[in-house]
Amino acid sequence: MRAITYSTAGGSDVLRLTERPEPVPGPGEVRVRVAVSGVNPTDWKSRSGATGAGPSAESVPNQDGAGTVDAVGEGVDPARVGERVWLWEAAWQRTDGTAQELVALPAEQAVPLPEGAGPELGASLGIPALTAHRCLTVHEAGPDHLAPGALAGRRVLVQGGAGAVGNAAVQLARWAGAEVAATVSSPEKAELARRAGAQHVIDYRREDAAAAVRAAFPEGVDVVVEVAPAQNAALDAAVLAPHGVVAVYANDGGDEAALPVRLLMGPNARWQFVLVYTEPRAAKLRAVQDVSAAVTAGAFRVGEEHGLPLLRFPLERTAEAHDAVEAGAVGKVLVDVQPA
């Protein structure tokens, strides 16, 4: 079968199109014929060695994907063969990601894809959607699950509303009943955030972002979904409601943030750091369940008309897909694994 592999950390030029033996699913596993592989920032960072020492064996990149179950291992219901699925964390602590024609992985990490949802949507879920779910459910008085009405009355600020996680956070928060504001850096991104469902869109390069957030939410923000804490720490502190939480899932713009301690003590504010890979297993499984429910309800969609343009590359151009994500491409970068 065709696969993209790498054996040393480095730039995207370490990725190679190779032939590998077809995997055999072990006990508790399914084998999936991958249609589309999703690319996330952690995929190129893992490949480059930015988040660790690099691979100890030949590895296939990419955590997310979608396809069809074509074989099952011992202990897995044979009826799953033929099931359309979306995949999450395929490459986490494993050497087999989704940038290959077939992948074997634990059965719970291959989630039934609802009717009407295409593989491009399935491959866009995974890390972005699970991260967004975690950010929206860490408020100390908030829900563990997302569902219609779960965030009713809550005010959510999504910093970077045109990114993949930002888009997922806007869609999930709106589905759950929150009022949502999103910050962006251009008129084009503002339009994408609106299409995702943000009711208030703030271009921080053209207006006073803190004043605009306060105008939208006079009582303050309950949850901030934060992509750039070093840049936005002062803004976040200025707009938080009592007992508000800033859920930090990335370090865009710097790795250290200065917080105004006394200002944050009064409202009992909280900063919560989020890395989906190491969050509690129970929280991951809740997120998987809720994200699937949102997709089934038609509340989670992709494409430019829904605020998340799709940028697609064939399998042999996976290196270009990684480069696009590293360069900050606007939209969701996908790799079409099966030939057209």
Image (cartoon, rainbow, N blue to C red):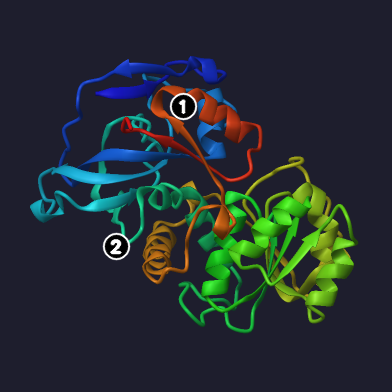
Q: Is residue 59 left or right of residue 102?
A: right
Residue 306 image offset from top left, x and y in percent: 55, 59
Seen from the viewer's position, the closer of residues 264 and 335 is: 335
Q: Which residue is mark 2?
A: 115
Name the image quarter holding residue 181. Answer: bottom right
Q: Disc 2 on helix, strand or loop? A: loop
The residue positioned 65% from the left and 56% from the top of the image is 192
Q: Earlier in the sequence, mark 1 or mark 2?
A: 2
Seen from the viewer's position, the closer of residues 54 and 219 is: 219
Pointer 1 with pointer 2, Cβ within 8 A: no
Q: Is residue 66 left or right of residue 298?
A: left
Residue 19 image offset from top left, x and y in percent: 27, 17
Q: Which residue is mark 1?
A: 318
Residue 78 image offset from top left, x and y in percent: 9, 51
In which quadrant is the N terminus drawn?
top left
Q: Disc 1 on helix, strand or loop? A: helix
Tell me which amino acid carries mark 2.
Answer: Glu
In which quadrant is the C terminus drawn?
top left
The residue positioned 63% from the left and 43% from the top of the image is 330
Q: Is residue 274 visible?
A: no
Tell me which amino acid carries mark 1.
Answer: Thr
The residue positioned 69% from the left and 44% from the top of the image is 251
Name the image quarter holding residue 10. Answer: top right
